[in-house]
Image: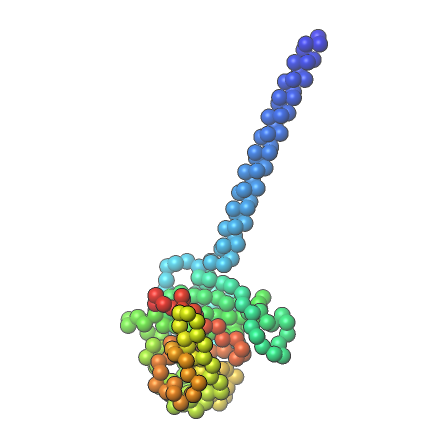
């Protein structure tokens, strides 16, 4: 009788030990799966677009305008962005909740585009455009109504841009140097917008920029918000 009891206790203990080991292994596997799933979800939040590139319409900067289109509409029409990330802006007289913007990057066969919104808000604040230089699908730069349409990559700083500019700022890093020229046009339809034209090289005098090729253009309703594509975004394009 005692032997049976002892055997039962030993057998039960062995079963219990194996059950504990099984549960520990199972929980460990589950934790690893959950961690991997979380990592994949975090990565998906950052890079959620497909790599099958579409062709962007020629007149995007005329068809879509800051404060007249939502990011939901952009996603509906263009799909999910290739990249989505937050950035802080330096601006006075702005509510704290509006000092962070969300940038949505889209890659097309013929162009790269950045859309921006204030964080957790819907309305588009700015649209930045860079042309890949494809001959079969050019995109237009956005200029004043006084000027004829010009293809981005061939459009240059004109007398009208120089006449209407309100700021010029240059910068550089180990890879490139650039100058951004801000201009506003006093036509009723676009007087609330600021146009930022980026050219290569550093210039302090606005007159020296005449005839220089426009590399990127940003149309924004709030001038401190003008995200630009980086050297690494554009170098191979």
Residue at position x 44%, y 61% in the image: 82
Residue 25 to residue 37: above or below: above
Question: How far across and how far down the image is residue 92, in percent?
Answer: 61, 79
Residue at position x 62%, y 23% in the image: 15
Residue at position x 32%, y 72% in the image: 133
Quadrant where the N terminus sits is top right
Q: Is residue 88 visible?
A: yes
Question: How far across and how far down the image is residue 32, in percent?
Answer: 54, 42
Q: Is residue 190 visible?
A: no
Nearer to us in this view, 208 or 167: 208
Q: For the view shown, which residue lies furthest in the front direction?
A: 174
Residue 69 to residue 11: above or below: below
Q: How many marks?
A: 0
Question: How far across and how far down the image is residue 59, in percent?
Answer: 38, 76
Quadrant where the C terminus sits is bottom left
Residue 44 to residue 225: above or below: above
Quick check: 236 left or right of 6?
left
Residue at position x 52%, y 47% in the image: 37
Residue 28 to residue 89: above or below: above
Q: For the view shown, which residue lies furthest in the left direction?
A: 135
Q: For the view shown, which residue lies furthest in the right direction?
A: 2
Quick check: 100 left or right of 63?
right
Question: How far across and how far down the image is residue 34, in percent?
Answer: 55, 45
**Display colour scheme:** rainbow
């Amino acid at each position: 009788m005692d032997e049976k009891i002892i055997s039962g206790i030993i057998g039960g203990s062995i079963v219990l030990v194996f059950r504990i080991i099984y549960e520990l292994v199972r929980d460990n596997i589950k934790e690893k799966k959950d961690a991997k799933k979380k990592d994949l979800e975090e990565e998906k939040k950052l890079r959620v677009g497909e790599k099958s590139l579409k062709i962007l319409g020629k007149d995007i900067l005329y068809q879509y305008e800051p404060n007249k289109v939502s990011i939901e509409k952009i996603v509906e029409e263009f799909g999910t962005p290739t990249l989505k990330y937050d950035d802080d802006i330096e601006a006075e007289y702005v509510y704290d909740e509006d000092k962070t913007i969300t940038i949505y990057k889209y890659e097309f066969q013929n162009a790269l585009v950045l859309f921006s919104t204030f964080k957790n808000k819907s309305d588009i604040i700015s649209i930045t455009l860079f042309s890949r230089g494809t001959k079969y699908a050019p995109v237009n730069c956005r200029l004043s109504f006084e000027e004829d349409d010009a293809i981005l990559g061939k459009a240059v700083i004109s007398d009208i841009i120089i006449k209407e500019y309100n700021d010029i700022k240059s910068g550089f890093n180990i890879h490139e140097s650039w100058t951004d020229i801000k201009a506003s046009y006093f036509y009723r339809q676009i007087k609330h917008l600021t146009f930022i034209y980026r050219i290569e090289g550093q210039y302090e005098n606005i007159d020296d920029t005449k005839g220089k090729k426009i590399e990127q253009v940003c149309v924004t309703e709030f001038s401190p918000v003008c995200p630009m594509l980086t050297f690494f975004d554009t170098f191979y394009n």
